[in-house]
Amino acid sequence: MKQSILFVIFVFITLHLFSQEKAFFENPVIHGDMADPSVIRVGDTYYTVATSSEWAPIYPVFTSKDLINWEQKGHIFEEKPGWTSQSFWAPEFYYHNGRMFCYYTGRRKSDNISYIGVASAEGTSLRFQDHGPIIELGTEAIDAFIFDDNGQLYISWKAYGLDQRPIELLGSRLSDDGLRLEGEPFSLLKDDEGIGMEGQHHFKHGDYYYIIYSAKSCCGPSSDYDVRVARSRSFKGPYEKYDKNPILSGGGGDYISVGHGTLVDTPDGRYFYLSHGYQSGAAFFMGRQPVLHELVMTDDGWVRFTTGNKAVNRQPVPFEGTVQKKQGDFRDDFSGKILKVEWTWNYPFSDIDVSLKKRELVLTGNPKADNDYGTVLCLRPQASRYSYQTKVSNVNKSFKGLTMYGDDKNLVTIGIKDDRIEMKSVREGTESVLFETVMAKGKPHFKIDVEGGCFLTFSYSRDGKSWTTVNETPLDMAFLVRWDRVARPGLIHIGEYGAPARFDSFVMKNERK
């Protein structure tokens, strides 16, 4: 009898501890480089969109029912808008009059100046039509945000970021259809401290209008980005900056830096802030990943985050009973009719031609001028320790295989051309062949193992089972990080358009704690 009672107590304690464990989730809520996320709720569904920078398709879109489990649904644009060239940053969602709007930043094709455009879709169809540029003022206009003040729409943006003067957040009235500025722009908030100011979010609570914004350096290993707040009794200001800023930052913990996000409210009126953050350590090489923190109002009319002013991984779940799903692996046998939504390509450097035929992926393209390293098809890295491999289905005069890709002047690759297997590194356009051998027969398999986010080991195989390791000491490829994005693993084709690469399969296996 005594043993039975002890067993019941043990089971009760175990279940209690298990239920407590399930009451938390771990940031990031989306794994991989997804900077500047914007989030809205329409009905019972949350929608987020993020920067795509120099990768296509343009602006990845995800949906969720619970804010912590997200699924990619597509992109805003499959091809870049006609008025733009590149650098697609900081998209902002807004839902109004039964339409979903996306206000976005892109470089104007005629002069490469970054300005703000707008696209819209009926309802939540996510089939967006571009309406062209909406803000073409000054030497730069980026980071749009839309706010409804008692029926009057306003748009705000970052201005003067490239000028010899303080950065300002400017605002303007917006037409009811969301497609035109009305009246003259006005100043909302100025960067008097000279520390940067961008990524703003407006909301009203009680008697105050609030601007949550980001300051300092957004990008790269030395990023010290943080989150700040100002308030006013009028949307047009003047705004008072909080004397306890920043209200959220990295440094000395789970995150190097954090910032550029938006708030979304839950059906029961709580606020959650979805921003991006660089994780500390090896996880830095996954890039700026979406992280979620709950925000509450304080008794003195300011705001704070429930887990403190340091960005942290472990957070209480937004909704009782919610369980965070584990991050899975990626596998593609190329048996579908269309390319999987996770794939991205290097549009500034090559016009890609990719198709699925007879359970194979056919990859080729027309590289732009001054690009000697072809066309790539890549994924966002989703772990700091992972491996990826492929089987090449054809051999011809083109080079084909695996890559870790920063840009057209910075990459590493292992592949085959004719009967020669090569591993090479390209740094600032200078190529170094690190290994080569002859493979007279067979269709090779290639594999890259990644440790610590940037340490790579290369292998090849004739059968996908017995592997020959090329480099016993992992190569440090940290140099592949670009100023606003990390390197991506994937497939590569270098050669004539008429000599494509054919791949039988691709697998990326993530290892997590």
Image (cartoon, grey):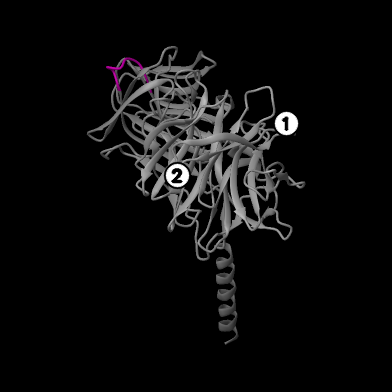
> 14 or 50: which is nearer to us?
50
Seen in the picture, residue 111 relative to 272 is either above or below; the reply is: above
- Describe the element under mark 2 as helix, strand or loop: loop
Check the image and name the residue furthest to the right.
243
- Mark 1 belongs to which amino acid? Gly
Residue identified by numbered label 2: 176
Question: Are the residues flagged by discs 2 and 1 in contact, CB closer than 8 Å?
Answer: no
Q: Is residue 194 magenta?
A: no
Mark 1 neighbour class, 10 Å CA radius: few under 14, some 14 to 19, many 20 or more: few
Residue identified by numbered label 1: 194
Give the extent of the magenta segment: 493-500
> 286 or 181: which is nearer to us?
181
- Mark 2 belongs to which amino acid? Asp
- Describe the element under mark 1 as helix, strand or loop: loop
Chain-order first, disc 2 or disc 1: 2
Q: CA distance from mark 2 to mark 1?
A: 35 Å
> 93 or 207: which is nearer to us?
207
Check the image and name the residue furthest to the front.
183
Which label belongs to residue 128? none
* Numbered disc in front, either 2 or 1: 2
